Image: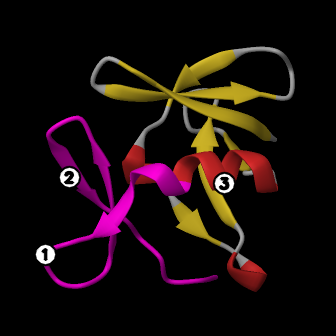
Amino acid sequence: MIMGVREEGDHLVLELSDATEEKLNPATFTVGRNNVPYVLVKKTEDRARFTRPAYYQLTNYLVEGSDGAPALKIGNRLYDLDTKAY
């Protein structure tokens, strides 16, 4: 589970429930049932859910992408997100 999100340089760091941290890989962002966001962690083997507080921290970086879909803006980079729920 993702407990927190913070910016560090040109990337976001995820604070995980097992007391480890790792960089967010925007390419692994997905949306599950009930619009719950997930990313893959632990070398893309485990799907981790954002806690509500962590999601609120993530929203500080959400913007509208060039096609009108949600994107993450981290530093000067824009990452389109896969927001199709599964």
**Sequence-earlier tag: 1 or 2:** 1
Residue 66's label in the rendered image is: 1
The magenta region covers 59-86
Say which element carries label 1: loop
Say if mark 1 contacts mark 3, CB within 8 Å.
no
Give the residue displayed 54% in from the left and 65% down from the top. Answer: 30
- Residue 78's tag is 2
Position of 5 with respect to 32 (left or right) is: left
Q: Quadrant of residue 70?
A: bottom left
Q: Label 2 is placed on what type of residue?
A: Leu
Disc 1, disc 2: CB below 8 Å? Answer: yes
* Nearer the observer, 51 or 26: 51
Quarter in which the C terminus is drawn: bottom right
Alpha carbon separation for disc pair 2 and 3: 18 Å
Q: In x, y percent, where is residue 21? A: 65, 17
Per the image, label 2 sits on a secondary structure element best described as strand
**Looking at the image, residue 75 lies above or below residue 61:** above
Residue 34 painted magenta: no
Dot 2: within a 10 Å radius of its alpha carbon, few (fewer than 14), some, or many (20 or more) residues?
some
- What amino acid is labelled 3 in the image? Tyr
Q: For the residue marked with disc 1, what is the amino acid?
A: Ser
Q: Residue at x 85, y 28 (%)?
A: 17
Query: On residue 55, which mark appears?
Result: 3
Which colour scheme appears in the figure?
A: secondary structure
Q: Earlier in the sequence, mark 1 or mark 3?
A: 3
The residue lying at 41 percent from left, 51 percent from top is: 61
